[in-house]
Image (cartoon, grey):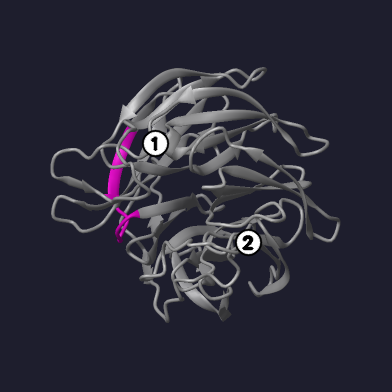
């Protein structure tokens, strides 16, 4: 089964955050059955929501699904929300509850490896929050909220390609992603407006965040860190910069949470000139290949991961649609599914596990798709 988060039209008394227009073509969380042999997706239902459930995350057992609902407010509450769902035997969703995300426009969430907390990044709120998971999988009120502060970076990205006018989030603080390291001892989040990767020690007993000895690392001014990914087999972290169109490779110290810069490489093919906004970053399960989304260039950059963690450009693949917001590789590693937000479809690609290259398969219509996640039944 596949679950697709979308930007959906607001319900009465709800005002949707205007993110990457056009908004509102989705209807909530769209559910599909997926053919393991061909990657074809068949509609299996919709959980209708008018609050733009743009980001999704399962618990480890995949018995509960959590959605970050990217609105500025719900009624009088100037905050987005996070919803929890139970999965029925047929794969359909049953709402458990919805709580405040403690900030405007939650753009990313993840489940802590210990399974007791959901971590949420509020893009327009410039804050991150820790939400406890109750015994039934529903959510409680936040145990900690941290609001980003500091000097906002310039509107011109240091590392942008020649001729770029990629200006998006350097107007205020913008927490864009949050996730724990594999051990769960640390929680990392990025702030695009501050050009920082921020590292916290995590108290799993109380759901509390405290600064590490070196609480953040800075990216080049204006580059705008958006998402990051840990290598599945080594202490390496890769960060993608939305406005700078780069991937930065760090060594991650699993004892202190420290990050040491090793490499910076463009997300784009050699010779590109003009504007581009990066989106997603992902590594294959075997750790051999890294994939980066490029919006406006509308491509997925494919990179080989060397034995020492450094990246080398392999190829690019056209996404077959406008503005690839995110993509996910299915649990078997056979297909990559790309959410082309402005084209209102998901494009599937077969993955060559030897070369890392992608071969287009088919389209599936979905209004303003944002993220896709998978669960075996």
Vertical order, 37 against 203 (above or below): above
Vertical order, 200 against 15 (above or below): below
Asked whether the residues under the numbered discs 1 and 2 touch, taking CB atoms below 8 Å apart as contact, a structural biologist would say no
The residue singled out by tag 1 in the image is 368
10 Å crowding of disc 2: few (<14), some (14-19), many (20+): many
Q: Is residue 377 visible?
A: no
* Residue 246: mark: 2
Q: What count of labels does the image hold?
A: 2
Magenta segment range? 95-105
Q: Which quadrant of the figure has residue 185?
A: bottom right
Mark 1 or mark 2, earlier in chain: 2
Closer to the camera in the image, 256 or 11:
11
Dot 1: element: loop
Closer to the camera in the image, 180 or 272:
272
Dot 2: element: strand
- Describe residue 166's horizontal placement relative to residue 270 as left or right: left
Seen at 67% across and 61% down, the residue is 237
- Describe residue 300's horizontal placement relative to residue 129 as left or right: right
Q: At which x and y percent is residue 18?
A: 29, 50
Whether residue 212 appears in magenta in the rendering, the answer is: no
Q: Which quadrant of the figure has residue 332?
A: top right
Per the model, the C-alpha gap separating discs 1 and 2 is 25 Å
Closer to the camera in the image, 9 or 330:
9
- Describe residue 23's horizontal placement relative to residue 208 as left or right: left
Seen at 49% across and 51% down, the residue is 110
10 Å crowding of disc 1: few (<14), some (14-19), many (20+): many
Seen at 39% across and 36% down, the residue is 368
- Describe residue 191's horizontal placement relative to residue 311 as left or right: left
Q: At which x and y percent is residue 303?
A: 74, 49
């Amino acid at each position: 089964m596949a679950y697709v988060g979308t930007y959906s039209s607001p319900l009465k008394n709800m005002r949707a955050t205007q993110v990457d227009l056009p908004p509102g073509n989705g209807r909530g969380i769209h559910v599909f059955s997926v053919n393991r042999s061909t990657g074809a997706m068949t509609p299996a239902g919709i959980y209708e929501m008018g609050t733009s459930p743009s980001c999704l995350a399962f618990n480890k057992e995949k018995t509960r699904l959590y959605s970050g609902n990217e609105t500025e407010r719900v009624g009088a509450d100037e905050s987005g929300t996070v919803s929890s769902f139970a999965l029925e035997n047929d794969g359909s969703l049953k709402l458990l509850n919805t709580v405040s995300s403690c900030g405007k426009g939650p753009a990313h969430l993840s489940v802590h490896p210990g399974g007791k907390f959901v971590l949420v990044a509020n893009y327009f709120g410039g804050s991150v929050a820790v939400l406890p998971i109750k015994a039934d999988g529903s959510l409680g009120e936040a145990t900690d909220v941290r609001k980003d502060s500091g000097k906002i970076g310039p509107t011109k990205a240091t590392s942008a390609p020649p001729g770029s006018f990629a200006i998006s989030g350097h107007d205020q603080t913008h927490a864009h992603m949050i996730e724990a390291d594999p051990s769960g001892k640390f929680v990392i989040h990025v702030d695009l407006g501050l050009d920082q990767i921020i590292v916290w020690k995590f108290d799993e007993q109380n759901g509390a965040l405290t600064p590490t000895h070196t609480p953040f690392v800075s990216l080049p001014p204006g580059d705008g860190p958006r998402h990051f990914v840990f290598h599945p087999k080594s202490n390496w972290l890769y960060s993608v910069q939305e406005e700078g169109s780069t991937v930065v490779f760090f060594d991650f110290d699993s004892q202190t949470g420290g990050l040491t810069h090793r490499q910076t490489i463009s997300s784009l093919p050699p010779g590109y000139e003009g504007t581009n906004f990066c989106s997603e970053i992902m590594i294959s399960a075997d750790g051999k290949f890294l994939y980066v989304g490029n919006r406006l260039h509308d491509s997925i950059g494919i990179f080989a991961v060397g034995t020492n963690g450094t990246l080398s450009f392999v190829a690019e693949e056209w996404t077959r649609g406008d503005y690839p917001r995110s993509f996910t590789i299915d649990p078997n590693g056979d297909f990559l599914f790309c959410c082309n937000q402005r084209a209102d479809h998901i494009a599937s690609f077969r993955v060559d596990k030897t070369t890392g290259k992608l071969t287009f398969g088919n389209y599936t219509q979905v209004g303003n798709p944002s993220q896709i996640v998978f669960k075996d039944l």
